Image: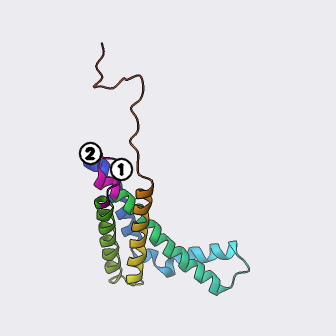
Amino acid sequence: MRWLRQWGPAVAWAAVIAMFSTEYSSASATSRVIVPLLHWLFPQASPGTLEMLHFAIRKSAHFTEYFVLSLLLLRGIRGERTGWIVAWGLAAVAIAAGCAALDEAHQAFLPGRTASAWDVLIDSSGAVGAQLLAWLRPVKKKPAPKGGGGLNEVRP
């Protein structure tokens, strides 16, 4: 159960990323939803501007997906320990970058999708950004509740 609690969120998030890697999340598929929404929000925007915003949203999604994955990987790597160690951060980034490369390789074989080294770079940047945040704001161990009540408490 400990393994599932530590690694389950990262595995589940990787599965979500894999679902986004299908032809159902291609640029043409997402443009059918995102571009009309953008047009509704910005009725005066030109079609070129709407396409540029659609592109920016899709690339931001890449960054965000792997930012979250990197934090969840750190959680799994760290286990029940607290804080942040360079080796943990590097391992999380390496795993996330490997997932990004596999994701893009997978897309090369799907109709309507293309593989892009730039997307791997964006994904990896998200993973690095997450580790920078984790380094700047390490998780602190929660103090034990006052008044006891723990199973290992010795009472007089």
> Front-most of 67 and 25?
67
Q: Quadrant of residue 40?
A: bottom right
Give the alpha-carbon distance from disc 2 to disc 1, as whole Å: 19 Å
Q: Vertical placement of 155 versus 34: above or below?
A: above
Binning the other alpha carbons within 10 Å of mark 2 as few (below 14), some (14 to 19) or many (20 upward) gives: few
Asked if residue 98 lies left or right of residue 144, the reply is left
For the magenta stretch, what is the residue range? Answer: 74-86
Residue 119 at least partly seen:
yes
Label 2 sits on a secondary structure element that is: helix
Which mark, by number, is residue 11?
A: none
Q: Vertical placement of 20 versus 139: above or below?
A: below
Asked if residue 33 lies left or right of residue 150, the reply is right
Q: Dot 1 corresponds to which residue?
A: 83
Q: Residue furthest bottom?
A: 48
Q: Vertical placement of 88 versus 26: above or below?
A: above
Q: Quadrant of residue 25?
A: bottom left
Residue 84 in magenta stretch: yes
Q: Could you tell me which residue is drawn at 50 percent across and 82 percent down?
A: 28
Q: Dot 2 corresponds to which residue?
A: 2
Q: Could you tell me which residue is drawn at 38 percent across and 77 percent down?
A: 120
The kind of residue on which mark 1 rests is Gly
Q: Residue furthest top?
A: 156
